[in-house]
Amino acid sequence: MEAASSRPGEDALIARYFAPLAGPEGLGLKDDVALITPPPGQSLVATVDTIVAGVHFFSDDPPHTVGHKALAVNLSDLAAKGAKPAGFLLALALPSDWTEAWLHDFTQGLGALARASACPLLGGDTTRAAGPLVISITAFGFVPDGTMVARTSAQPGDLIAVTGTIGDAVIGLKARLSPEADWVQKLGESELAFLLDRYLKPRPRYEASSAIRAVARCAMDVSDGLVGDCAKMLRASGVTGTLRLEDVPFSVAARAAIRFNPALRADAVTGGDDYEILFTFPPEQLDAVASAFKHLSVSFAVIGEVRAGDTPLTVSYGGESFEAQSGSYQHF
């Protein structure tokens, strides 16, 4: 533990670790506000997420991965709205045992993703926490006026699709919690490393935001579990639908884990931290969707259909009804 007397004061801390991450709208982090001017014809989109040590990440996770995750979960929300990142505000409540070394590595991970996504720091607040580390980020993005992709606009007949792969993070979490489990021991070294890394460092699909804006009728990010989030999106749109688990995309590593432990399939489609984009589109637009994703580093897969009605989402696997204890992670 670093002695409190040896730590920099708040102004020095901001100048040393956070000012280098700031964009011009942040006014050098020398004011109490940021000044954001949307480009002509653009609307401002905002989102906020809070992550807490012991709830969303382990207290001993590498600090750079914590910084990455804190921003990544917000970038995922912006991407699902078709928004281009514009900047973020950071509220950081540090526990009594924080160290400069931890803060250095945290800002390295935060800054690396901020630069990669062109989402600079605009300002924020740093304070002392009476309990665990708490990190809250409010992120902003721009979309052309009238083009934000809502969660409430799915229509009967739409196809349901998802980007990337599902279940990697929750399987990685289970492997971390039970490293001696038989199925974990059977995984190859690279497979295990991939799954553990997907839990530590979410891959927000910000590079797909323009494609989502161009082709999606309705969208949200998958943060609490595919089945539950799909049901949530359809309820918000006043419709229902069908979901085919055999069409859900899994990584090579996740498929290996499920092969060694078939019960992981249910965990994969109901666990959180995927941060992929779930979206719907009219079936006649399938070629246009394929074209929009053709040159991106992320793929998509059609996994179901939207139906009229208010009955619960129908989930099947191989033609048989699939039942799960819970469709998604719940905080309360």
Image (cartoon, rainbow, N blue to C red):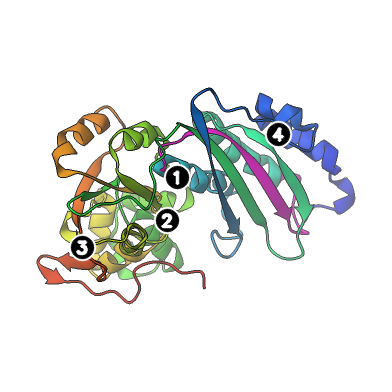
Q: CA distance from mark 2 to mark 3?
A: 24 Å
The three-letter amino acid code for the residue at tag 4 is Ala
Q: Which residues are magenta?
A: 81-101
- Rendered image: mark on residue 259: 3
| Mark 3, other Cα within 10 Å: few <14 / some 14–19 / many ≥20 | few
Give the label, 4 or 2, closer to the camera: 4
Taking the image as shown, residue 115 lies to the left or right of residue 136, namely left
- Rendered image: mark on residue 61: none
Circle 4 sits in a helix, a strand or a loop, which is it? loop
Give the labeled residue for mark 4. 34
Circle 3 sits in a helix, a strand or a loop, which is it? helix
Give the labeled residue for mark 1. 76
Give the label, 2 or 3, closer to the camera: 2
| Mark 2, other Cα within 10 Å: few <14 / some 14–19 / many ≥20 | many
- The answer to whether residue 190 is magenta is no
- Check if mark 1's residue and mark 2's residue have beta carbons within 8 Å: yes
- Going from N to C along the chain, the mark reached first, 1 or 4, is 4
Taking the image as shown, residue 229 lies to the left or right of residue 100, namely left
Circle 2 sits in a helix, a strand or a loop, which is it? loop
Give the labeled residue for mark 2. 223
Q: CA distance from mark 3 to mark 4?
A: 50 Å
The three-letter amino acid code for the residue at tag 1 is Ser
